[in-house]
Image (cartoon, rainbow, N blue to C red):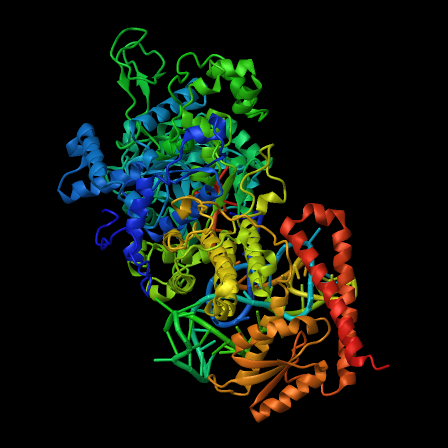
Amino acid sequence: MSLTDGVPQPSATAPADGDLPTTYRAADVEAALYAHWQAAGTDVARADRVTRRGGARTPFTIVMPPPNVTAILHVGHGLNNTVQDVLIRWRRMAGDEALWVPGTDHAGIATQNVVEKQLAAEGSSRGVLGREAFVARTAQFVETTGGAILDQLKAIGCSADWTRTAYTLSPPLSAAVTEAFVRLFEEGLVYRGHRVIHWCPRCMTSLSDEEAEFNDAQGAMYHIRYHVDGDPSRSIVVATTRPETLLGDVAVAVNPSDARYTALLGAMLVLPLNGVRIPVIADDYTDADFGSGAVKITPAHDPNDFEVGMRHGLGAPVIMDAEARLQGIGEAVDRVPPELRGVDRFEARERIVNMLRETGALVKVEPHAHSVRHCYRCDTVVEPRLSDQWFVKMAPLAAPALEAVRTGRIRIMPERWEAVYINWLEGIRDWNISRQLWWGHRVPVYYCDGCGTAPIASRTAVTHCAACGGPVRQDEDVLDTWFSSWLWPISTLGWPGQGSPGKGSIKGSESLQDSRIKGSESLLESRIKGSESLRDSRIKDSDPLSDPLSADLQAFYPGDVLVTAPEILFFWVSRMIMSGLHFMGEVPFHTVYLHGTVRDMQHRKMSKSLGNGIDPLDVVRLYGADALRWTMVAGMGLGVDVLLDPTDLDKSFAPGRNFLTKLWNIGRFLLTKVGTLPVAALESVAPASRTIADRWILDRLDAAIRECDAALGPVRPGADGRWTEAERTQGMRLDAYADTARRFVWNELADWYLESVKPRLAAGGDDADVARAVLVHAFDNALRLLQPIIPFISETLWAKLPPLANGAARGGEFLCTSAWPVAQPQIDSGGQDFELVRTAVVAIRQLRNEYKVKPGAQVAVTLVPAGSDVHSAPQLADTIAALSRTTVTVHAAHGAGAAKAAHAVLTGGSEVVIAMSELIGTESAEDTAKECARLTAELATTQKILAGVTAKLANDSFTSRAKPEVVEGARAQERDLSQKVESLTRKIEGLCGSR
RNA sequence: GGGCGAAUAGCUCAGCUGGUUAGAGCACCUGUCUUACACACAGGGGGUCGGGGGUUCGAAUCCCUCUUCGCCCACCA
């Protein structure tokens, strides 16, 4: 589908009169605006602008987790890509050369399954088609319908660099896959292994450990009696959950220290059903306390049994075929009785259990809860299967990947996943990378059947045997999809590049590998330092600009942030770290951001089969992409799941929709009031001419910018490339960022400043111009803060801002490529006086409400300033009057008395008396002495707390270790507390100071 | 079986090496079509911070313990 399908096509430009429609209609704006951005190339990154290529900008790179090429957009993609887009847009505005690499994954098993399903519907199969035709068919399927998801991402505003769209099965990325395989082969890190692996009898392929997922299941433990050959009085009982495999048993193992069975060691048992004779052996593998303490050993159908069999030099008879039907293979043909041949494993289990029961061999069956591995693609129960597969030796790759996280070159957020990552890598096992599929990268290994020379791994197609000149055949298997995915951060940027080493790289690879395993120093680092031996092994020249690495790779690698879900931490994230370190000598990113899952109100994961999904494009049509984005970002704590109700989109997306409407109305009102005439730049407004409201809102803006920056956090680690302990957990709080921006624009700018400025704008004159300047400045910056989250509406409103009087540009044609705001603390203070206004207004409103004063009725208020407020009170009176719709007069009186007066007078319904800065309500002390005692006690407490905070701030371990914003918060608290002490002291003097 | 995390308002969550009256969004109650916005405005109700101990002048926050959920890992067949 195309982005603009079904969307009305308005003229891309605004109405000539500059008027904004009364309601925001996202559909009228988004598609056209996106097209504008595309035409202007706002999302395209350029290597030559990057410092690493002699440019001036710092790169900021994110690679998009490539969706399956056949996928259609679901809300999980929406969440994942929105997060990335927010980060990319933020950094783009902040002046980085921001590159977001998009693309798709060929998704071996998943895609092959889809096409096979199609074929089945047509009454055909891949077997009928044959390999070549099947691959062609799949490629064509991908060609015509694949990649639609990328267009859908455009509809939600993703600002990826589409000129760099990648695909794992494209020629350049396939070359990277081959290169990686051959290098690892040459380094001895890829090998062929004969062992029991996970096999999906439906997909008819092997699976890696990660692809065979555990599911809890309620099974049964079958206790079966095996009699000693020729002596039916002696027997041993084995316990198993898979009785059907007994036909392939080669021994029964007991623990050597298990006295119960010592006498039976070495005895020959007779297998029920097929009469095969097997020995009783001793092996530590057996746990005497589990089951019956005797384990049947079936080497071909259980990975542990395979190990035991190897130790004892036993055979490995195969009694099941590839589709998991009982079938004696090869020499084991007679092990399966004729009546069981070709019977499916689960039916066979039932039948075998019945047969055992009839012969009396079944001792008992007890319920047994255990975990069963299932295929992660089709959920079929995985069958352990003995076969030849290609493996990657993981330990040497894992060691530097562990180091990278341990030493802080990579941080994983939320932090608790670091432990999971470390735990997994420490116990990592070799990675089965061959798949018995057709859709994927074919294993680049060639065999000569003629002379039996060792298999050759080759970067280019091999036709003849180098040794004997005879024909060769290529390995039939393809590589695990993740074997291409793990190269994504480097392959999408052009690795291995033009002058890739290729030949001769075996030489010296030993030392190269060793140095990396020790984690001593990265390849890139050593290149910079000019370490000859390392460089020679791989890269011949030393001039970075003519480096064989591609310009993109030089400019944008290492990247910055990886945004994904925790589910693929092992599948993908950890392996990318390994491949990045191994092939490039540098980590592919410094931050791994793991977000939550989108779930429904019952906390169930949204899925097609449950029918509880939300189509992001529905949300876009109903409320706009911005509403979708806002709702997800604002509702997403670090690593926290996002809950949405698929049955009530209106409610689910209310936060986004409501905020957009509010923002639109703020913009509409503000722009109407401000008009289209040029407005003074803030710098050219004399500070002295700013009112306390002006100073206040500028102050709040400054705070908002700082808070947003703090929430988003440090962008990258320091010069040494390592996160400090404190930095590891800082930033990436997108919800806090959204909340701060919302609070500023809604609760501060709109609720207070905008209200307070209405009379000034209406009055006209110089002060109105000051107000216009401040208003436009504040709104301009608010839109900048919001752009990364809600790019469409913010861009639309920004475009309507009146021009600056000095003719200065605001920062380009588009908001999305203009500058991120920089906090500029105001040189003049006074903003805090506005807090008095707010407090007074709130108090008046409360009293009006409490005394049921009619909304339209004007009420006279007497302000009773205390202490130093006396001086500012007259200036504030007008603002208070305007905001609370009252008539305000200033009158000196003492606090408690004033409150009493308020009570009395209000009852009469004509006058309100408010004590400023105390604002004692109706609950004030009847008794001055009581109030004095209370204040004195409060003063004592406050002083105690102040002492505590001061002590904390004097503590070096706090100021140096705690997060900066925490320290700043403590300082602010200290200031507040001392102010409070002062004010309490003053109050006590005023109220109780008669002595 | 091992490891990790969480329990705070009706719901979903903040609460930043212990510090003033524990916050937000949504929901709820009252009033208001106040010329930007009823997808709004104004005001309000609601939490013994899972239970029990402990440390401290002070605990949602630190320690111990119990309970209940959740996640990850795992070759007891």
Residue A530 percent location from the top left of the image: 56, 17
Measured along the vertical axis of the image, is residue A520 above or below residue A794? above
Task: Find the residue positioned furthest to the left.
Answer: A123
Give the quadrant of residue A200.
top left
Compared across the picture, whether B12 is left or right of B64 comes to left
* Residue at x 54% of width, y 46% of height: A289
Measured along the vertical axis of the image, is residue A397 above or below residue A561? above
Task: Find the residue positioned furthest to the right.
Answer: A995
* Residue at x 61% of width, y 54% of height: A826
Q: Which of A827 and A584 is in front in this view?
A: A827
| Image quadrant occupied by the C terminus of chain A | bottom right
Q: Nearer the viewer, residue A387 or A71?
A: A71
Residue B22 percent location from the top left of the image: 61, 68
Please tell me how many numbered marks the rendered image carries.
Answer: 0
Residue A862 shows in this picture:
yes
Residue A312 shows in this picture:
no
Task: Find the residue positioned furthest to the top.
Answer: A468
Compared across the picture, whether A993 is left or right of A404 comes to right
Residue A6 percent location from the top left of the image: 21, 54
Residue A505 percent location from the top left of the image: 44, 14
Task: Find the residue positioned furthest to the front.
Answer: A765
Measured along the vertical axis of the image, is residue A172 above or below residue A732? above
* Residue at x 72% of width, y 88% of height: A926
Give the quadrant of residue A92.
top left
